[in-house]
Amino acid sequence: MHAATMKRYQVRNLDCAACAAKLENSLKKMEGVDDAVVDFAGLTLHIQARDTDRIQEMVRRIEPDVELIPITERAAPAPQATDRYRFKREMALLGVSLVLFLVHLLFEERLHAAWFGWEYLLVLAAYLPAGWNVWTAAFRTLRRGDFFDENVLMVIATAGALGIHALSEAVAVMLFYKVGELLQERAVARSRRSVGALLNARPQRATVQGLNGLEVVPPEQVAVGRTIVVRPGDKIPLDGVVIGGQSQMDTSPLTGESRPQSVRPGESVLAGAINLHAALTVRVTRLFRDSSIVKILDLVQNAAARKARTERLITTFARYYTPAVVLAAALIALVPPLATGADFRTWIYRALVLLVISCPCALVVSVPLGYFGGIGRASRRGILVKGSNFLDALAQVKTVVFDKTGTLTQGVFEVEKVVTANGYRPDELLAFAAAAEMHAHHPIGASIVRAFERSGGKLDANEIVDHVVLAGRGVRAEWHGRRIVVGNDPLLHQEGIDHEVCAVEGTVAHVTVDGHYAGHILIGDRLKPEAAQAIADLRAQGVTRLVMLTGDNPCAAGQVAASLHLDRFEAGLLPEDKVRHLEQLLAEAHGGKVAYVGDGINDAPVLARADVGVAMGGLGSDAAIETADVVLMTDSPAKLAEAIAIARGTRRIVWQNIVLALGVKAVFVVLGALGLAGMWEAVFADMGTALLAVVNATRSWGVASVRG
């Protein structure tokens, strides 16, 4: 049996949200399909199936006209090229219908007096150009055995109106339905273009330096270690390190920040940033498929596959709402006339009014579109949300838990003091510590190695053996036959080594040699300039608890917690200790969500355990970014408050649309049943509500009030 694989497709010729929902539900029920998500706003299909070669065949069984185009690494979803032509064609047909309808209104009495056949001919001439594709779609739906499609209901309502001689209403309903449908499509297309503009940040070429000069190739063909040249005005095609030239970068496609960033030799640059001033020579450090920009675009494109609970509830509601209203319409059409002898024409008309407002388009389109816009808005601001379910969770965050190093502090360590014990000299202690830390990648270890090299020391990597990283505690290695351990206070307790308890403000790295305490190194780290403002912004967003969990010593942690006025902190923690403390905070949350913010590989377990894991993507580890639910593309904690503001604004818009749509429909169901609303009012209410909801949903592209 084949294993299920996930694939993405661009969907063409899918022009209604209800059809998208039905396609998704039908695919999920098919044998061999583990999961399927149809994103109508993005016109993409995410499907996990055991036989991906049969997916097009499966889709055609459900929607014969729908065409699937596989989305490859080079091909991102794009708006259909025929959309503009189709819109112009539909508008021309609507123009013809409108002119003929106006002629009918002007000469209705004369035509009826002359011969009722002329009246019907003119009405049909106005009705068919507007309604031909609705009838075609309804016929296809009925052929599949589905009786609750919006097109079928619109055909029944308008055909019924023609049958009871409500001719003006029949044409008007079809006209306004089509106008509303086209305007709705335009609004959705505008949102798709916004995401399309975001996807245009993908670099298309790289200028590689080789033996025969410069060669322009696709970024996918460039290997790690190759040298590329980036001219002024070009996008950085791959992640790398500058080895020649100085310039400024526009990193807004990645981070959402318009402030230019200076780069010089030795500094890293990320794919997708734009070189502004001078040519740069860059050594490639990552393949294109692993680059920052590809990860961003993959996250944006796949976000729709993780639907919010609200979206799923609305899809379920829509499945039952339409049949319920149709049943109510049938009862209204039949029961009163049969029970009381009332006029069939009057009650059939009232039933047709209910059919007009029975389609849940306002909900089915606007709710996913609201989340789609919120995710797109966040992406443009350098905040990557991996799904609308995480956007919903982010909106409900009441507790934020921070790692310290690299999250609230700069993570740029410098050795401030070397304190020896048991007869060791400062230069010896620094040499032992540097040897143990040489192969480690933690910023504390790097600062010790830098300090040793600045003092004139040199190390031969071949002389360092048995190097072991002790996650969250320190490192162990052997150098010149001496067994060296460098780590924190808990590590020395674990090793059973007596040592000084350092009541100092700063990060302390203890050093032991052959099981004997040799001293400690005091390492300084500074708060990020925006950390205090980030805490203030989070409190302004209604976050009630701000906590720090760190592996650093209590003295250094206490200083940071006091400076930022945090509610609580725990220090000296191993990764498993952080998970334990986080679980305690989750138990105390009482309905509010708990977010954890970190950047290191040690943060991956606790990021996975939090309600919302937030990785600092600017300098964060790949493990943290892969595990997290939200990625901040800068190393600024202030972005978290902006992410929460966007999430809450999006959720507010989604619920506005739900209340608007359900409220208006409930009112007109009652008015229609009582005979207080006709088909004119019903179609205005139905399509007007859908348009208002869609327009309101598009506001989520611009909601981000951090302090209010």
Image (tube, helix red, strand yellow):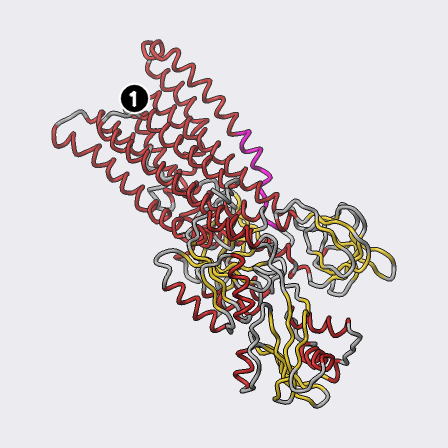
Type of amino acid under label 1: His
Which residue has dot 1 on it? 165
Q: Quadrant of residue 265?
A: bottom right
Splitting the image into 4 quarters, where does residue 33 fall? Answer: bottom left
Question: Residue at the location (52% across, 58% down)?
Answer: 614
**Would you say residue 33 is visible in this rendering?**
no
Residue 383 can be seen, yes or no = yes
Provide residue 352's location: percent of width, then percent of height.
29, 30
Q: Is residue 277 left or right of residue 212?
A: left
Q: Residues within 10 Å of mark 1 (few under 14, many from 20)?
A: few
Looking at the rendered structure, the secondary structure element under dot 1 is loop
Give the image location of residue 454, x and y in percent.
Answer: 77, 71
Q: Which residue sits furthest right?
A: 212
Query: Relative to the observer, which residue lies in front, 455 or 317?
Result: 455
Question: Is-magenta flag for residue 310?
Answer: no
Residue projecting furthest to the left? 340
Q: What stretch of residues is rendered in magenta?
A: 76-89
